[in-house]
Amino acid sequence: MPGKDYYKTLGVSRNASAEELKKAYRKMAMKYHPDRNTGDKAAESRFKEVNEAYAVLSNAEKRKQYDMFGAEGFEKRFSQEDIFRDFDLGSIFREFGFGGGGRSQNIFNQFFTGGQQGRSSPFGTGHGPMHGHRSERGRDLIYELNLNLEEAAVPTSKVVSYQSNGHPETVSVKIPAGISSGKKLRIQGKGQAGSRGGPHGDLYVQVKVLDHPVFRREGDDLYIDKEIRFSEALSGTEIEVPTIDGKTLRLKIPPGTQCNAKFRLRGYGMPRMGGTGRGDAYARVFVSVPTKLTKKQKALLKDMEEAGL
């Protein structure tokens, strides 16, 4: 079954600002508030959904996790208790003029505790933890790691330092060759500690490969721009082309080469992550056109014009 679409629940776009979220939440909460819909079970259900959606999207870290892992992935990592932890709905209701108790609190106490006493309330007025609570898995953590293109082109290791449960942690991460931006590496058991003896969550290292001053990456292929003179385009030449692994290749440019022509260098692109072989490199040739000509160049140009060039 697909996970909950919190953005759709509040009727906002995925890039909605905090103010837009708050405005949409207020509108929906007022519409479905139990004091305005006495006995309407459908409205009561929508009221719960609206508050759950706002509890997630109004929290920067929870929203980031929801956007990154998707609805289903988020639900596997966050329980109802996690969603409403440190979220004072009573205070929000009072801000909007709803009041913090009455039917709305009773509904939430039943919804989030299953009618049991001893579970924490989203209004911050519940009882203390009940003995015999089941253990819960710790939260996953996200670490954003920047790599340059040369680092992404070879297998490497990086030591990352981060905070978990208020304590500094350090772990070595193996980076496979050919990794690209957006890829996540899972380090099992290196997330936050679980509650009541539960297992640790995982650490996800999300990679961002930085732009390169020479190469442009498209998938596993690399592109490099090279400039030649007009005369070289006419008569042909030979140019030097660097590769991502530090080599220099000699590339023949045939006579009559047109501007924006591409030359393929097979196997000189990025390694294919998780596969075999490499992508290709492409040298794209641009013909340099001078903006000012000397007298000698003007004379030569006139001769070329007369010769039909």
Image (cartoon, rainbow, N blue to C red):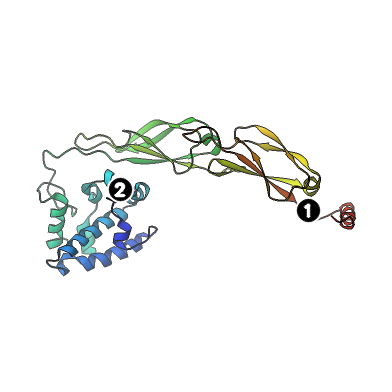
Q: Earlier in the sequence, mark 2 or mark 1?
A: 2
Check whether the beta carbons of the residues at disc 2 and disc 1 lie within 8 A of each other: no
Dot 1 surroundings within 10 Å: few (below 14), some, or many (20 or more)?
A: few
Dot 2 surroundings within 10 Å: few (below 14), some, or many (20 or more)?
A: some
Closest to the observer, 35 or 40: 40
Residue for badge 1: 290
The residue sitting at 33% across, 61% down in the picture is 21
Say if residue 279 shows up in the picture.
yes
Q: Secondary structure at mark 2?
A: helix
Closest to the observer, 168 or 196: 196
Question: How far is mark 2 from mark 1, CA to CA?
Answer: 58 Å
Residue for badge 2: 72
Q: Secondary structure at mark 1?
A: loop
Closest to the observer, 123 or 144: 144
List x then y, in percent, for residue 72.
30, 48
**As displayed, is residue 233 above or below residue 266?**
below
Amino acid carrying mark 2 in the image: Glu
**As displayed, is residue 174 above or below residue 119?**
above
List x then y, in percent, for residue 97.
21, 67
Amino acid carrying mark 1 in the image: Pro
List x then y, in percent, for residue 22.
31, 62
Q: Nearer the viewer, mark 2 or mark 1?
A: 2
Quadrant of the drawing holding the C terminus: bottom right
Q: Is residue 217 left or right of residue 225?
A: left
List x then y, in percent, for residue 253.
74, 42
The residue sitting at 27% across, 47% down in the picture is 75
Q: Quadrant of residue 99?
A: bottom left
Q: Is residue 237 left or right of residue 120?
A: right
The residue sitting at 11% across, 66% down in the picture is 39
